[in-house]
Image (spheres, helix red, strand yellow):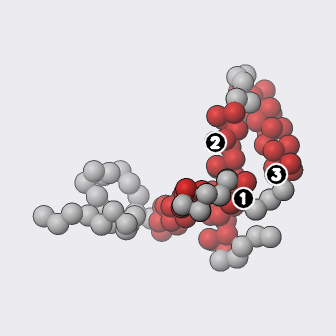
Amino acid sequence: MSQPDPTNPRARDPRFPDRPTHPDFVRLSETVQTHDAMTEELGLTPIQVVGVDEESLMYFMRNRMAIASQRMHRDLTHPRFMALYLDAFALGKAYAESMTGEVAP
């Protein structure tokens, strides 16, 4: 039996039987791989990948995490949660750009 192609997210892989093969999954997978390459191989920070003003994004992120903390009745302002929020923001921006084919300013 041949091995599945690990670079093809649409290929069925018995190690990941629940992995979707939908085109959105492919786009998400490619977005994550590109984002990871930019941060790891090029040495860019997530904020540099996003390409927005650092002070503005940090202010926005702190406030969104404070609101989420109030709604969930738990402290989400820990740096780990904020880093996750930043990563999700960067991936969301890149995914949106991949849907339109345009890079946001």
Question: Quick check: 1 above or below 45?
Answer: below
Please tell me which residue is depicted at 67% across the width and 75% down the height of the picture.
Answer: 100
The mark closer to the camera, 2 or 1, is 1
Q: Secondary structure at mark 3?
A: helix
Q: Which mark is residue 24?
A: none
Quarter of the image with the C terminus is bottom right
Looking at the picture, tell me which residue is in the foreground, 13 or 82: 82
Quarter of the image with the N terminus is bottom left
User: Distance between the Cα atoms at labels 2 and 1?
Assistant: 15 Å
Please tell me which residue is depicted at 68% across the width and 60% down the height of the picture.
Answer: 49
Looking at the picture, tell me which residue is in the foreground, 58 or 42: 42
Tag 2 residue: 84
From the viewer's perspective, tell me whether residue 37 is left or right of residue 53.
left
Please tell me which of labels 1 and 3 falls first in the chain: 1
> Badges 2 and 1: C-beta atoms under 8 Å apart?
no
Please tell me which residue is depicted at 41% across the width and 58% down the height of the picture.
Answer: 20
| Amino acid type, residue under disc 2 in the picture | Leu
Q: Secondary structure at mark 2?
A: helix
User: Distance between the Cα atoms at labels 1 and 3?
Assistant: 8 Å
Tag 1 residue: 48
Q: Residue 44 location in percent, x, y? A: 65, 58
Q: Residue 25 location in percent, x, y? A: 48, 61
Please tell me which of labels 2 and 1 falls first in the chain: 1
| Amino acid type, residue under disc 1 in the picture | Gln
Disc 3 crowd, CA 10 A, few/some/many (<14, 14-19, 20+): few
Q: Secondary structure at mark 1?
A: helix
| Amino acid type, residue under disc 3 in the picture | Glu
Please tell me which of labels 3 and 2 falls first in the chain: 3
Tag 3 residue: 54
